[in-house]
Amino acid sequence: MVAPDSASISSDQAKPGTLRLGDLSVGRLGFGAMRITGRGVWGPPPDRAAAVRLLRRAVDLGISFIDTADSYGPAVSEELIAEALAPYRDGLVIATKGGLTRPAPGEWRRDGRPAHLRAACEASLKRLRTARIDLYQLHSPDPRVPLEDSVGALVELQREGKIRHIGVSNVDVNELAAARRVATIVSVQNRYNLTDRSSERVLSVCERDGIAFLPWFPLSAGSDAVRVSGAIAAIAARHQATPAQVAIAWLLARTPVMLPIPGTSSLAHLEENMQAARLQLSAADRRALD
């Protein structure tokens, strides 16, 4: 298998290159911190110490980009990141999001009002124990609020020094264009993976204009979806890899602006995901998956 025992993995073994987020440079394989919370992305994890160890191991392995949101827990993911990693080492970029609320388990509600986004950002600053958030993303456009108003609130926070760079999430090409008329957008975070390419047009814009693209749910092809894809299974077997590793390797090979952020609460899966950076898909492999 591509993933060896954790004791044999070093940060130098899994470096898939870098990309730019404005004036920041980050490794092209990040970590999504949604799953370090409790079941259903609600409440604390069953083993808080294990979650802290996982985050520290991710950074030890060379991850320089961690993505979270105030709605993960809610608040729990940000608190754990600060507990594990603050004060943050040089070169480590922490990105968070605002604009979704969690009134109850299983509920996700949009709130793009400027007042809410300001309060959400300031609360994230406190939880993350930082004076400025490297990348703050609008979690989802709110149909009740003009997108220009939501993004404009982030621009105001940026001018105040509370946000370094602005990103958007769950947008179509028209919404991305609207956001870019108001702010310099350095990243887009949309659902994208081997079996769901509905954001292909958005990805094309990002590739054309050098905007980082963060695919969320990047490993759907590494779970249930792999059962219906003989190509993925065959490629994984040929490379002595896992389907999840093939899914990550395909994303990394898809375009230089891709920044996968696979998340997990398992140390073993973290090690496995990191090793995907070493997996080189052939042209034939990519044709089979494309």
Image: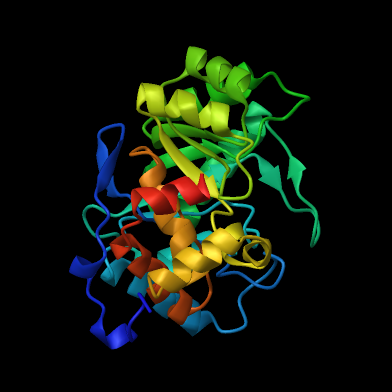
Residue pushed farthest front? 284
Q: Nearer the viewer, residue 280 or 136?
A: 280
Q: Nearer the viewer, residue 74 or 20?
A: 20
> Where residue 91 sits: x, y (%)?
23, 52
> Where residue 286 sits: x, y (%)?
43, 49
Identify the coloring.
rainbow
Q: Quadrant of residue 217?
A: bottom right
The image shows a total of numbered marks equal to: 0
Rendered-image quadrant of the N terminus:
bottom left
Residue at (59, 52) in percent of width and height: 70
Residue 69 in sight from this viewpoint: yes
Q: Is residue 214 left or right of residue 26?
A: right
> Does residue 164 lie above or below 35 as drawn?
above
> Does residue 209 lie above or below 197 as drawn?
above
Residue at (44, 57) in percent of width and height: 248
Residue at (34, 53) in percent of width and height: 282
Residue 32 in sight from this viewpoint: no
Q: Is residue 278 left or right of residue 188?
A: left
> Does residue 10 lie above or below 123 as drawn?
below
Q: Nearer the viewer, residue 235 or 18?
A: 235
Residue pushed farthest left? 12
> Where residue 210 sits: x, y (%)?
35, 27
> Where residue 93 sits: x, y (%)?
33, 50
